[in-house]
Image: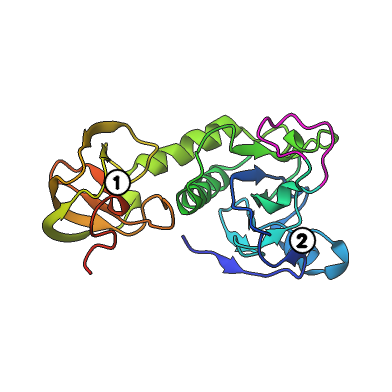
Amino acid sequence: MAMQWIGSPNKDKGREGFRVEAIVIHIMEGTLKGTDAWFSNEESGVSAHYGIGKDGEIHQYVGESDRAWHAGRIVFPTWRLLKLDVNPNWYTIGIEHEGREDTPWSDALYDASARLIDEICRRWAIPCDRDHIIGHREIRSDKTCPGFEADLDKLIDMANAFQRDPATFNFIKKPGFVKARVDLNIRELAPTTATAVVRTIKKGRRLKYRGWTSNGMNVNGNAHWYKDFDDHYFWAGATEQPIPGL
């Protein structure tokens, strides 16, 4: 997915040992251009990881491995996965969206956001559901963010459709065999734990594959998945050759 790096001085390096566990959806209450300037201003004291324009343009302000300053204030939260006594910025990624609280979202805005959410969820092995994709007001209830027009259920449904779409993933065609290192699950249609388990293979069994992808869901740091001749997938990390082709 194409995006433009803008950068922001308003961040903390690293995440103090926390890993990304959720995505917070925001509304800019303004334009993408204005948000670029605001996040680039050290005096603003705020930032997010990404901003998406109404035409689907994506800007990045902070690397995902660093902490952006987008959801640190907690006011009567309703998010059930909130960690007590931990700033949410340490374990979330923030995505801003162009518009105001009462601005209808364009199709391009929904599409770009859903695609970005899909990629982030795969990189960090985040479940793509309503518990892990939340609105800012679920952390800070004195704000309306992300507004009244943001349909988070629709956004999550779209991201899940990308998660299950085989066309989303690259494919290297090179048949071979590999042995299961542990019991492993064969997944339906896409290289992600979000899809159904077709069957489970016992440790030590040899499996035939027709190729692999390197951009499936990242599980324990490994995003490689083998594809079998039924167009199903199994995670390479559960085999004796966790990096295909080596």
Q: Is residue 66 left or right of residue 174?
A: right
The picture places residue 185, in percent across and down from the top left corner, at 27, 38
Q: Is residue 234 left or right of residue 98?
A: left
In the picture of the structure, the residue carrying the numbered disc 1 is 166
Q: Secondary structure at mark 2?
A: helix
- Identify which residue, 27 or 183, lies in the foreground: 183
- Identify which residue, 127 or 185, lies in the foreground: 185
Q: Is residue 236 left or right of residue 144?
A: left
Whether 3 is drawn above or below 86: the answer is below
Amino acid marked by disc 1: Pro
Quadrant (top left, top right, bottom left, bottom right) of the C terminus:
bottom left
Residue appearing at x 43%, y 58% in the figure: 221
Residue appearing at x 59%, y 45% in the figure: 21
Magenta: main secondary structure: loop
| The residue stretch that appears in magenta | 73-84
The picture places residue 175, in percent across and down from the top left corner, at 11, 58
| Residue 13 badge | none
The picture places residue 140, in percent across and down from the top left corner, at 80, 38
- Identify which residue, 194 or 2, lies in the foreground: 194
Lower position in the chain sequence, tag 1 or tag 2: 2
Residue appearing at x 36%, y 57% in the figure: 215
